[in-house]
Amino acid sequence: MRSQLAQSPGLPRSAEGDPVFPEPWTAEAFAMTVHLHEKGVFSWSEWAEALSAEVHKPGRAEDGSDYFDCWVEALSGLLVIKGVTDADAIFGLQKSWQRAAEATPHGAPIALANDPLSRPI
């Protein structure tokens, strides 16, 4: 049985109708969203409303090329609204991943541990 999220309007699809992803991170964002929805963190209607709001914000790409940026923004917003995390924590992780990406040698997988400011847990 397919998740309702797999039926999202505007989701890029293969000729067979399966979701396709332009980058690995987009597939991960999709999977994380499906998992959180299935665990009851947010309802289908809440997700659809949040994604729609992001997609229709002024300044969004008319060709849909920023669809997964909208996806991540919608997911982040829902996580904050639902009290799962706060905006500062999301921003901190975003900055940490950026530093990790900049510190990772070309061709090597980016790992959060590559953030030069990260502290061992």
Image: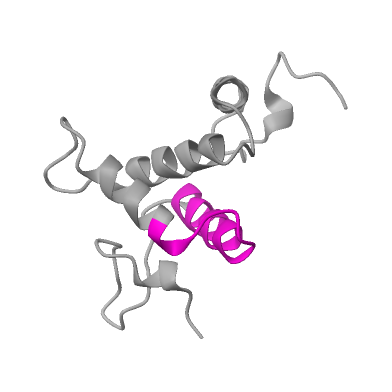
Please name whichever residue, 48 or 14, is drawn nearer the observer in this view of the structure. Answer: 48
Please name whichever residue, 99 or 92, is drawn nearer the observer in this view of the structure. Answer: 92
58 inside magenta stretch:
no
* Left or right side of 121 for 6: left
Q: Would you say residue 64 is visible in this rendering?
A: yes
Quadrant of the image containing the C terminus:
top right
Residue at x 40% of width, y 42% of height = 74
Predominant secondary structure, magenta span: helix
* Rendered location of residue 68, percent (x, y): 36, 47
Residue at x 57% of width, y 28% of height = 90
Name the image quarter holding residue 106.
top right
* Left or right side of 100 for 11: left
Please name whichever residue, 45 or 93, is drawn nearer the observer in this view of the structure. Answer: 45
* Rendered location of residue 84, percent (x, y): 64, 39
- Residue 95 vs 11, above or below: the answer is above
Residue at x 30% of width, y 74% of height = 14
Q: Residue furthest right?
A: 121
- Residue 6 vs 85, above or below: the answer is below
Q: Would you say residue 66 is visible in this rendering?
A: no
Q: How many marks?
A: 0
* Rendered location of residue 55, percent (x, y): 24, 45
Q: Residue furthest top?
A: 117
- Residue 36 vs 38, above or below: the answer is above
- The magenta-colored residue range is 25-45
* Left or right side of 14 for 121: right
* Rendered location of residue 37, percent (x, y): 55, 60
Q: Give the image's coloring scheme.
A: one colour
Residue at x 35% of width, y 57% of height = 48
- Residue 83 vs 37, above or below: the answer is above
